[in-house]
Amino acid sequence: MSRTEVPTLRLPISNYAEMRRMRNSQLVCVLRSAVLSPEKVRRFRPAPPSEYDAYRVRMEAECICVDLLTNGSSVFCCRFESAEDY
């Protein structure tokens, strides 16, 4: 799957500066509690897949991306962005 075909959820975050200082495992925990928890997952479009086998965290200049992976390929991307940009 190419990068452009991967469903991407863009989330503005008020504590973005704090998130930039977090370890990858902490960022995955944020994703799991804010997006992937059963009571919240239905709120989002595009919806994250119910099955995946790994995470990959990418720090980019304008965002923090956490990819959900299946067999090493990205199947979903959650893109955390500064709320100030909205």
Image (cartoon, rainbow, N blue to C red):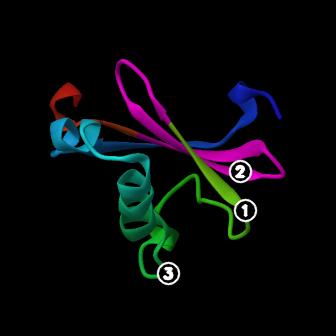
Task: Assign the magenta stretch its main secondary structure.
Answer: strand
Q: Observer-nearest residue: 14 or 61?
A: 61
Q: Which residue is mark 1?
A: 53
- Cα gap from disc 2 to disc 3, whole angstroms: 19 Å
In the rendered structure, which amino acid carries the disc numbered 3? Pro
Q: Which mark is residue 31?
A: none
- Residue 81 image-quadrant placement: top left
Q: Which residues are magenta?
A: 58-79
Residue 75: in magenta span: yes
Q: Could you tell whether 7 is left or right of 36 in the image?
A: right
- Tell me whether circle 3 and circle 1 mark residues in contact (CB < 8 Å): no
- Tell me whether circle 2 and circle 3 mark residues in contact (CB < 8 Å): no
Q: Position of residue 24 (x, y in %)?
A: 43, 47
Q: Earlier in the sequence, mark 3 or mark 1?
A: 3
Residues packed near mark 1 inside 10 Å, few (<14), some (14 to 19) or many (20 plus):
few
Q: Which residue is mark 2?
A: 69
Q: Earlier in the sequence, mark 1 or mark 2?
A: 1
Residue 46, relative to residue 49: is it above or below?
above
Residue lying furthest bottom in this view?
Answer: 39
In the rendered structure, which amino acid carries the disc numbered 2? Leu
Q: Could you tell whether 49 is left or right of 15 in the image?
A: right
- Tell me whether circle 1 and circle 2 mark residues in contact (CB < 8 Å): yes
Please identify, in this view, whether the residue under mark 2 or under mark 3 is nearer the observer.
2
Q: Position of residue 65 (x, y in %)?
A: 48, 37
Q: Which residue is mark 3?
A: 38
In the rendered structure, which amino acid carries the disc numbered 1? Asp
**What is the quadrant of the C terminus in the image?**
top left
Residue 38, relative to residue 52: is it above or below?
below
- Residue shown at 59% from the left, 59% from the top: 47
Q: Secondary structure at mark 2?
A: strand
- Residue shown at 25% from the left, 44% from the top: 19
